Image: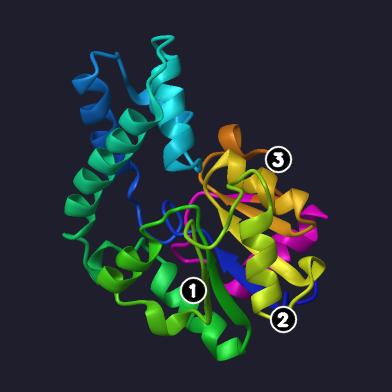
Amino acid sequence: MDTPKAWLFDLDGVIVETADLHFKSWKRLADSLDIPFGEEENQALKGVSRRKSIEEILALDNRTLPEEEIQQLMDKKNGWYQDSIAELTPDDILEGIPEFLEELQQMGVKLGIGSSSKNAQFIMDYLKINDIFEVVIDGTKVEKTKPNPEVFLKGANALGAKPSETLVFEDAASGVEAALAGGMTCVGVGSEEHLGDADLVISTFEGLTPQALLEKLEHKQ
């Protein structure tokens, strides 16, 4: 396939693995509410907003709370999570990502971040990757979260690319759905079981070059 003009990366789970940090924070919150919460329940929270995640946890116990308490819970969870991500360093970037991004920079394509997280900028600061990406569209810059394609449409537009010229990397089913709904090609990063709707699924970037990835996509089409 032709080399995409814009390459958009989700952050959590694609460039750095923060899922366990999220899980520990959500579990701590659920425990404080006496709501049973494990890995299976956590899977439903991948790629969705903080507000939606709170609603999902409360729904496990058929519980409703006043808006003020929901806001307090969101702030509490985010405080715990921010404490944990403050310990991130460039060494936490996932295997193969630095080499993959370096090759993309040499190719001269446009690179951006498309993340639902409102903490994306903090994470990028700790990882020291700000100078790699021209555009960062995160949860502070969109009104609708994934699976709505707004985050990726804004990212492509900011990079001067049409959706059809944009390649998205996602680790969550909601993100894959968002990319496809936006008319973009999507590479799922993770398991075929959860990301099977993507145009291509890879388990890792380790040993993978952009050209080899494009050849895999070409073969799938």
Q: In front: 42, or 106? A: 42
Label 2 neighbourhood size at 10 Å, few (<14), some (14-19), many (20+)?
Answer: some
| Region rendered in magenta | 201-221
**Nearer to us: label 1 or label 3:** 3
Q: Is residue 108 magenta?
A: no
x and y, in percent, of residue 7 in the image? 62, 71
Left-right relation of 68 to 43: left
Please name the residue that numbered disc 1 is placed on. 100
Label 3: state its secondary structure. Answer: loop
Q: What's the amino acid at mark 1?
A: Phe
Whole-angstrom CA distance, mark 1 to mark 3, is 23 Å
The answer to which of marks 2 and 3 sits earlier in the sequence is 2
> Residue 137 location in percent, x, y?
53, 66
Residue drawn at the location 42% of the way across and 41% of the way down: 50
- Asked if the residues shown at circle 1 and circle 3 are in contact, with their CB atoms under 8 angstroms apart, the answer is no
Amino acid type at mark 2:
Gly
* Residue 194 or residue 6, whichever sits in front: 6
Q: Is residue 217 magenta?
A: yes
- Which badge, 1 or 2, comes first in the chain's sequence? 1
Question: What secondary structure is marked by label 2?
Answer: loop
Q: Real-space Cα distance between discs 2 and 3?
A: 26 Å
Say which of 219 and 18 sits in front.
18
- Residue under the point 66% across and 38% down: 196
Q: Which residue is mark 2?
A: 160
Neighbours of disc 3 within 10 Å: few (<14), some (14-19), many (20+): some
* Image mark for residue 197: 3
The tag earlier along the polypeptide, 1 or 3, is 1
Q: Which-is-in-front pick, marks 2 and 3?
A: 2
Counting from the top left corner in percent of width and height, residue 149 is at 68, 53
